[in-house]
């Protein structure tokens, strides 16, 4: 008996006209769901018993099958189970190393079919499914990787979302910083064959340091936009618990280029010369050094690390091979501030008013942006 015949036999248990019409509508939704999983996601729905058919039928009654949400996890101790006895949930195997746990969750507008993807190639499949469902390519995707601990053990997770493209010309720095970074990236890309010929990992690193509010994290998004690639953020707070080997395997299995952002890297790296450094800090430092520059390093990536406290970093971090560029981002000059105001279409009078807020002190880009937005808001109120 085929899946559809099986579903029809179950759906047509009652024979009243009202029930038959209702069942036909359910059947169409079920067919849509099965077709969507197969043709759009490349996943063959295999039902092993009557109960699973009823589960999916119940799903398509409750939610719009087009409303998919995605989450990826990789528990170390997760056991494969072809037929878990959990109401409204079951597992589909994608390949020998990856499988999907499907359930319905959420309330009202957030209600949807959730797919949790497990396995060594989970990151790759997560992207394939998410991209086919919602996005044409990877260029506007951001993936946040972090570690979690639970009663069932320790595991790492990755949540995918979109990020707004950030063109380089929307950021403002002194000292021709943007051109220097773009030239470095262009030169790195041009030498890809050189890396391959010598068996070297194709990667580069850029360390951005300076006071808060100077655009360090925003520059990472701009680099991803410039390279037309996805952005991965590493959660520094849970870094010590991450299984770096599995994370790197998933990134490499995807075979795409990524910017990997390590924000506030000083929270992981500390100088190993300090007397009060703990064993835990030493482990974290050695672990991330290994990620940045070893056989464990992912291929085809650009590491971007940010810090407000560059003096706290271990000196070995800044050496060439780990970070090929170290750039200080500081407060900006009046000329650069005027360019920033002009980009928001402020008049000369409005620009001078915004910059006057910094009389007697340095101009911080983030603070200036807030002032500019206030000027724009006030101008709209006057018009209204």
Image: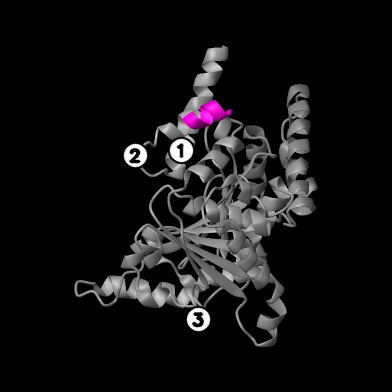
Q: Who is closer to the viewer here, 69 or 202? A: 202
Residue plotted at (37% across, 58% down): 237
Is 198 situated above or below 276?
Answer: below
Q: Which circle, 3 or 1, is nearer the viewer?
A: 1
Residue 352, above or below 135: above
Q: Earlier in the sequence, mark 2 or mark 1?
A: 2
- Whether residue 109 is visible here, answered yes or no, is yes
For the residues labelled 2 and 1, the Cα–Cα distance comes to 14 Å
From this viewpoint, which residue is outermost toward the left?
276
Q: Secondary structure at mark 3?
A: loop
The circle on residue 294 is: 3
Magenta stretch: give its range.
347-352
> Separation of disc 3 and disc 1 at Cα?
41 Å
Assign the C terminus to one quadrant of the image.
top right
User: Which residue is tagged 2?
Assistant: 360
Residue placed under numbered mark 1 in the picture? 368
Report if residue 6 is visible in the image: no
Mark 2 Cα-neighbour bin, 10 Å: few <14, some 14–19, many ≥20:
few
Q: Earlier in the sequence, mark 3 or mark 1?
A: 3
SS under mark 2: loop
Q: Is residue 310 left or right of residue 220?
A: left
Most frequent secondary structure within the magenta stretch:
helix
């Amino acid at each position: 008996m085929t899946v559809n015949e099986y579903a029809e036999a179950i759906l047509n248990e009652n024979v009243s006209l009202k029930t038959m019409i209702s069942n036909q509508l359910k059947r169409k939704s079920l067919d849509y769901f099965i077709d969507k999983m197969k043709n759009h996601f490349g996943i063959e729905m295999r039902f092993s018993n009557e109960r699973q058919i009823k589960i999916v039928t119940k799903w398509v009654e409750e939610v719009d099958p087009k409303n998919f949400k995605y989450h990826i996890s990789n528990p170390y101790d997760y056991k494969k189970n072809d037929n878990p006895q959990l109401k409204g949930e079951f597992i589909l195997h994608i390949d020998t190393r990856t499988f999907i746990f499907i359930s319905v969750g959420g309330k009202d507008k957030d209600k949807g079919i959730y797919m949790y993807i497990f396995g060594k190639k989970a990151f790759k499949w997560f992207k394939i499914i998410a991209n086919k469902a919602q996005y044409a390519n990877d260029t506007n995707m951001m993936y946040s990787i972090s570690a979690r601990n639970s009663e069932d053990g320790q595991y790492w997770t990755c949540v995918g979302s979109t990020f707004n493209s950030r063109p380089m010309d929307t950021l403002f720095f002194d000292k021709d910083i943007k051109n220097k970074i773009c030239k470095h990236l262009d030169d790195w890309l041009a030498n890809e064959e050189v890396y391959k010929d010598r068996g070297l990992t194709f990667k580069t690193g850029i360390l951005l340091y300076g006071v808060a509010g100077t655009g360090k994290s925003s520059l990472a998004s701009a680099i991803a936009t410039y390279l037309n690639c996805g952005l991965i953020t590493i959660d520094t707070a849970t870094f010590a618990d991450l299984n770096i080997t599995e994370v790197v395997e998933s990134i490499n299995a995807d075979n795409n280029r990524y910017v990997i952002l390590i924000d506030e890297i000083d929270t992981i790296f500390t100088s190993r010369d300090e007397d009060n450094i703990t064993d835990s800090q030493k482990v974290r430092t050695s672990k991330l050094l290994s990620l940045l520059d070893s056989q464990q390093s992912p291929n085809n990536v650009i590491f971007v690390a940010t810090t407000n406290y560059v003096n706290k970093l271990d000196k070995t971090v800044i050496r060439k091979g780990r970070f090929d560029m170290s750039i200080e981002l500081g407060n900006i000059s009046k000329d650069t501030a005027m360019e920033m105001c002009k980009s928001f279409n402020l008049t000369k009078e409005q620009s001078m008013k915004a910059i006057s807020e910094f009389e007697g002190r340095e101009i911080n880009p983030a603070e200036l942006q807030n002032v500019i937005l206030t000027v724009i808001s006030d101008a709209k109120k006057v018009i209204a």
